[in-house]
Image (cartoon, rainbow, N blue to C red):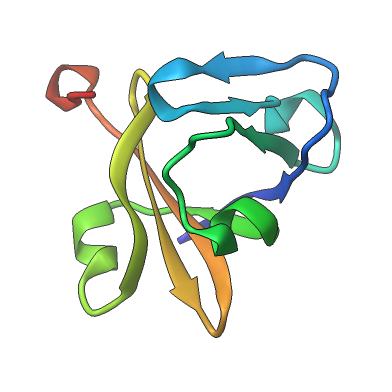
């Protein structure tokens, strides 16, 4: 497991916004700042748990997302925010944690 970034929910607009319509979410690129912060704004009808929409999360890259989810409290099932990336959210001691796996884009369905 490798640390990736810190995701911070916000209701405000921010520089460098990236809309992800199929996930009803707007994000910033965590690689565009030296601190690895990703701002996240959820659209009004985004179907996510309040915990994910309101509490910052740490994100980690994993080699096998499915294996990492076994026995965990999954808040958001695996999905693909962008080509080549599969993510899911789990709950750890009352906080959201994002797990990310870089994958072959031919295997991803949205």
Q: Is residue 24 above or below residue 62?
A: above
Quarter in which the C terminus is drawn: top left
Quarter in which the N terminus is drawn: bottom left
Residue 94 placed where, x, y %?
A: 57, 80
Q: How many numbered tags mark residues here?
A: 0
Most extreme residue toward the front is 45
Q: Is residue 83 above or below residue 5?
A: above
Q: Nearer the viewer, residue 76 or 32?
A: 76
Residue 38 placed where, x, y %?
A: 71, 38
Q: Nearer the viewer, residue 71 or 61?
A: 71
The residue positioned 57% from the left and 64% from the top of the image is 51
Determine whether, in the image, residue 51 is placed left or right of residue 48: right
The residue positioned 84% from the left and 43% from the top of the image is 35
Determine whether, in the image, residue 33 is placed left or right of residue 110: right
Determine whether, in the image, residue 91 is placed left or right of residue 73: right
Residue 58 placed where, x, y %?
A: 62, 59
Q: Nearer the viewer, residue 67 or 74?
A: 74
Most extreme residue toward the bottom is 93
Determine whether, in the image, residue 85 is placed left or right of residue 69: right
Q: Nearer the viewer, residue 27 or 45?
A: 45
The residue positioned 67% from the left and 34% from the top of the image is 41
* Location of residue 90 by image quarter: bottom left
């Amino acid at each position: 497991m490798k640390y990736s970034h810190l995701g911070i929910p916000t209701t405000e607009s921010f520089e460098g916004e990236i809309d992800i319509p199929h996930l009803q979410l707007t994000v910033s690129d965590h690689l565009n700042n030296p601190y690895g912060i990703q701002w996240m704004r959820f659209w009004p009808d985004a179907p996510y748990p309040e915990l994910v929409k309101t509490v910052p999360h740490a994100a980690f890259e994993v080699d096998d997302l499915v294996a990492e989810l076994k026995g965990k409290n999954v808040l958001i099932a695996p999905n693909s925010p962008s080509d080549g990336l599969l993510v899911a959210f789990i709950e750890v001691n009352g906080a959201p944690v994002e797990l990310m796996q870089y994958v072959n884009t031919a295997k991803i369905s949205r």
